Image: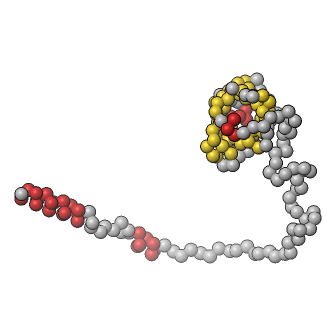
Amino acid sequence: MNLKYAAIGLTVALSLAGCQRTSYDSGYRNQQASLPPLQAQPVPSVQSGQLADPTMQGSSQFPTAPAGAAPGAMTADVVPATAQDVTKEQMVGNWRVANGGASCDMFLTLTNLGSGSRGGTRGCSGELTSMGAWEVSGKQVVFKDRDGNVVGRVYKTAEARYDGTSNSGQPISLSR
């Protein structure tokens, strides 16, 4: 029985020992007090003037959008009239890619990555080596690098075939 009380006493003593206050700022306050104050820095003058009225025609600093282009529309590649409808679900999985005379593999998932979904390539060359994301835009599948820059586009031409080009103009074909 005495052993039981000794064990309980030792446990309580060790528990209380863990509650001791320790101080880790031994020299920090002394160092902080000895630092000189920061010196004021000169501030450049502020300019003022009247801004152009943004509602006036031609006063915008931005170029006008091409005729018939919706905001955010992709105008770099024209989709053929024969392009078939495409959904993200149709694209998920593994694809065999023919790109500029070489072949490689592409993997597309539904995992979100920025404004698109995560994807990647293995054994590809050229722009497709940097492909990290993809998205469906109308009847196109757009491939992007990890920074969100478009590296290529394809459109559905048959049940399990997509054709298009990379940004450099190399043909891209996906098939299963």
In the rendered image, the vertical position of residue 101 relative to residue 2, given as above or below? above
Coloring applied to the structure:
secondary structure
Q: Quadrant of residue 39?
A: bottom right
Residue at image location 68% in from the left, 74% down from the top: 42
Q: Residue at x 84, y 51 (%)?
A: 70
Q: Confirm whether residue 137 shows in the render.
A: yes
Is the N terminus in the top left, top right, bottom left or bottom right quadrant? bottom left
| Front in this rendered view, residue 105 or 168 | 105
- The residue nearer to you, when weighing 89 against 100, is 89
Residue at the location (65% across, 36% down)? 92
Is 68 situated above or below 91?
Answer: below
In the displayed structure, does residue 143 sit left or right of residue 3?
right
| Total numbered labels placed on residues in the image | 0
Residue 89, percent from left and from top:
67, 38
- Residue 67 x %, y %: 92, 50
Residue lying at the far left in this picture: please name it: 2
Camera sees residue 130: no
Q: Which residue lies at the image location 86% right of the left edge and 75% below the top edge?
A: 50
Q: Residue 170: name its quadrant.
A: top right
Image location (x, y in percent) of residue 125: 70, 30
Rendered-image quadrant of the C terminus: top right
Picture coordinates of residue 71, whole percent (x, y): 82, 53
